[in-house]
Amino acid sequence: MTKKIKMMLAGLLMMPALALGAAVLAPVSDTAYAQGIQEGANQARGDDMQESIDAEDGLIRDVVNILLFIIGAIAVIMLVIGGIRYTISGGDQSQVTAAKNTILYAIVGIIVALFAYAIVNFVLDRIIS
């Protein structure tokens, strides 16, 4: 029984990796490729460097958004794992407590990520304007 559960969890954890691999290997149009090269050359010269870092669609916002997406995905996965652990605990009080703690910490992680997103956007809006 536990072997089947481990296989299911492994399959669930492999799906995001496969989706990410498909997104990375997707073909890029020639126009987008040329624009990327031109933008890279402009940044190497220092043109609009400040704007690319802290503007509306700047580097800081991109990094924060990517990190928050990763944190959110991990928290959702931990919620699922906590639910599975709670379901298969079989009434064992220590396993039930561990599963509840996993769910609690996942929810706290989501709340912290939301507050971090709000704080970063507030600070960047004040800096930009």
Image (tube, rainbow, N blue to C red):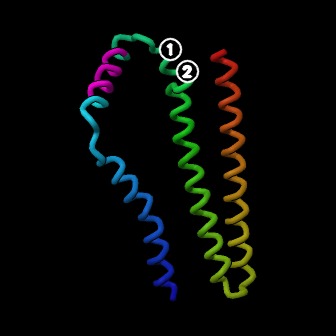
x and y percent of residue 67 in the render?
Answer: 54, 42
Q: Dot 2, how many residues are within 10 Å of its Cα: few (below 14), some (14-19), or many (20+)?
A: some
The dot on residue 50 is: 1
Q: Is 37 in the magenta? A: yes
Lateral position of residue 23 relative to residue 9, left or right: left
Residue at image position (70%, 46%) is: 112
Lateral position of residue 43 relative to residue 81, left or right: left
- Label 2 vs label 1: CA separation? 6 Å
Residue at image position (52%, 41%) is: 66
Q: Is residue 9 above or below residue 48?
A: below
The dot on residue 54 is: 2
Lateral position of residue 81 relative to residue 5, left or right: right
Q: Main secondary structure of the magenta part?
A: helix
Q: Amino acid at mark 1?
A: Gln
Query: Dots 2 and 1: beta carbons under 8 Å?
Result: yes
Residue at image position (72%, 41%) is: 115
Q: Amino acid at mark 2?
A: Asp
Q: Quadrant of the C terminus?
A: top right
Please give the range of residues in magenta: 34-42
Q: Is 112 in the magenta? A: no
Image quarter of residue 123: top right
Residue at image position (69%, 65%) is: 103
Q: Is residue 80 above or below residue 75?
A: below
x and y percent of residue 38 in the render?
Answer: 30, 19
Q: Is residue 86 above or below residue 76?
A: below
Q: Secondary structure at mark 2?
A: helix
